[in-house]
Image: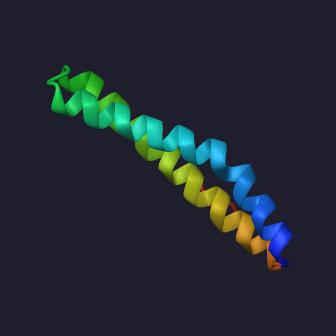
Amino acid sequence: MDKDEFAAAVEAGEPLIAQSMEALKRYWEARDYGAPAEEVERLRLHSESLAQAVSDYQLHTVAKLRGQKLPPLH
C-alpha cells in the first residue's frame, strides 16, 4: 500500500464519516434538548448504524489495500 492509495481510500470515506458525525450531533442535540424518547432512540440507532458502516468501510479498505479479503461483517 503506497501513500497515494492510502490517501485516496481515506478521502473516499470522508463523506460517510461526515454523515456519521452529523447523525451523532443530531442525536446529542435531541437528547440534550428533551426530544421525545422515541425520537432520541431513533436518532441513536441511526447514529450507531452509520458509525458501524464507517468502521466496516475502514476495515475492508485497509484489508483490501493490504491484499487481504475479509468476510462480510454484517
38 displayed left or right of 53: left
**Residue projecting furthest to the top:** 36
- Residue 26 x, y percent position in the rendering: 36, 31
User: Which residue: 17% across, 32% down?
Assistant: 32
User: Which residue: 68% across, 51% down?
Assistant: 13
22 displayed left or right of 7: left
**What quarter of the picture does the N terminus occupy?**
bottom right
Residue closest to the eye, 37 or 12? 12
Coloring scheme of the render? rainbow
- Residue 15 x, y percent position in the rendering: 64, 42
Q: From the viewer's perspective, is residue 15 above or below residue 36?
A: below
Residue closest to the eye, 57 or 17? 17
Residue closest to the eye, 44 or 6? 6
**What quarter of the picture does the C terminus occupy?**
bottom right
Q: From the viewer's perspective, is residue 66 above or below residue 52?
A: below
- Residue 29 x, y percent position in the rendering: 26, 31
